[in-house]
Amino acid sequence: MASSFHIIQFDSLPSTNHYLREHYHNLSPNTVVVARHQSAGRGRFDRQWVDDGGNSLLVSILLKEDEFNYPIPLVSLATALAVAKSLDQVVTTQIKWPNDVLIQGKKVAGILLEGVSSSKMDAIIVGIGLNINQRTFPLEIASKATSLTLETGRHYDKDMLLMRLLTSFSEEYHALKRGTFSLDEYKRRLVMLGQTINYEGQTALVVGISPLGALQIKMGEDFHEVTSGEVETIDLYHHHQ
Ligand code: BTN
């Protein structure tokens, strides 16, 4: 499955997502760009994604279809599930909606999706940053970030993890296109169901995930669906009955 990807490797790029955004027109679907280091790595909400040059996987996958025949927000969830499943042989992970992958509450992988559209959606760029062999993180993120090495004490082969990641992504993406993507499987790995979260300054209870991938929350007596915005988990390990 992973063999259907065309992988381009760089020592350094400003950002693998940015590279695909600039070149998507001339590149075939399933082109994968990997960089050892990014000088201007980007995260969600216009944040930076900083790397130490060599200890993480920095990868972007180009999706191109004549028609995107599935709900586009689900790509985000499918990617998170793919990343989580690709790590199953290494460590137990959880997902924080929509697409952070955590180990014991700390982030091990982040995903940044970008759509390129003209009159229709031309391409989707799936950017994944996976922390692998780091032993330390900058002070600002040290309490929130982790790596596979920090969690297990072992060193990992990045190429092997990339192959597992692409195989896993390919499976979830095909499921999405066939209409067989399992939201239940995603939900089983979600840390937030039944938990109290902070949403835009208010307390809310997470009650589910909609078929289109929105977070369903209850605030007071009202139900809402959250499609964007940042949600902050308050009691990560406390499950309501
Ligand atoms: C987030 O959690 O905020 C998303 C982080 C996404 C980082 C990856 S690294 C590869 C790709 N290129 C980028 O500039 N960003 C994504």
Image (tube, rainbow, N blue to C red):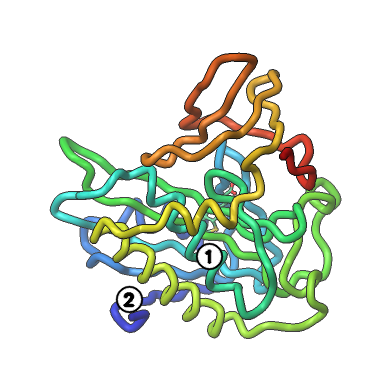
| Label 1 residue SS | helix
- Give coordinates of residue 141: x percent, y percent: 78, 49
Which residue position holds label 1?
83
Nearest the viewer among 135 and 85 is 85
For the residue carrying disc 2, how many other residues have a C-alpha within 10 Å: few (<14), some (14-19), or many (20+)?
some
Mark 1 or 2, nearer chain start: 2
In three-dimensional space, the C-alpha distance between marks 1 and 2, rounded to whole angstroms, equals 16 Å
Residue furthest out toward the front: 241
Residue at 61% across / 40% down in the picture? 47
Quarter of the image where the C terminus is located: top right
- Closest to the camera, between mark 1 and mark 2, is 1
Residue at (48, 40) in percent of width and height: 209
Three-letter amino acid code at the position of disc 1: Val
Residue drawn at point x = 64 percent, y = 25 percent: 199
Q: Quadrant of residue 56?
A: bottom right
Disc 2 residue: CB within 8 Å of ligand 1: no
Residue placed most toward the observer, 31 or 144: 144
Q: Which residue is mark 2?
A: 5
Instruction: Say few, some or many: other residues with alpha carbon within 10 Å of mark 1 (under 14 / 14 to 19 / 20 or more).
Output: many
Res. 30 image quadrant: bottom left
Q: Position of residue 130 (x, y in %)?
A: 61, 64
